[in-house]
Amino acid sequence: MKHRSAYTRVTGASWLKEAARIMAIAAGGLLTILGVTIAVTPLPFGAFLMATGLVTLISASPTVARVVRDLRTRFAPVDRTLCLAERFSPSCLARVLHSTLPERPRLIAAPVRA
């Protein structure tokens, strides 16, 4: 599966589009930090805020998408948590989380010895 490692960015983008991207990064960062701090409560609002903020950050920044993909590759608990969030989130959010799946090598069967 091909991953979105480089998002298309128009070099002559207007300042309004760039300002909207910066605002999306700020809002995503704020939601992620707020979700992490609320995650210790028994209610699942922290996980929802964290996933929403992470999806916003991944959508707005290719660097964040690469970092999340690397984290999912190195740390299995992070990958399991994001797979769980992907399964229970709406399709528009799940699609963005699915784009950060790490590339796993396919298992190739060993040659049969006669």
Image (cartoon, helix red, strand yellow):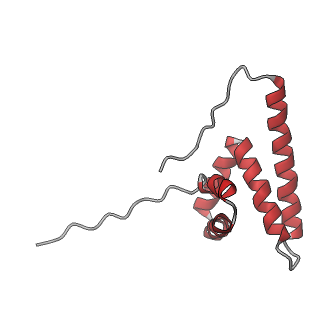
77 left or right, relative to 47? left
User: Image quadrant of residue 84?
Assistant: bottom right
User: Image quadrant of residue 102?
Assistant: bottom right
88 left or right, relative to 44? left
Image coordinates for residue 41, horizontal then vertical, percent: 88, 76
Q: In the picture, which quadrant includes the C terminus?
A: bottom left
Query: Outermost residue toward the top?
Result: 12
Relative depth, front residue between 109 and 14? 14
111 left or right, relative to 56? left
Image coordinates for residue 38, horizontal then vertical, percent: 89, 69
Q: Residue at x 80, y 30 (%)?
A: 18
Q: Residue at x 68, y 25 (%)?
A: 10
Relative depth, front residue between 2 and 36? 2
Image coordinates for residue 108, horizontal then vertical, percent: 32, 63
User: Image quadrant of residue 87?
Assistant: bottom right
73 left or right, relative to 90? left
Query: Outermost residue toward the front?
Result: 91
Eyeballing the image, is 46 above or below 101?
below
Q: Residue at x 83, y 24 (%)?
A: 15
Query: Outermost residue toward the bottom?
Result: 42
- The mark total stands at 0
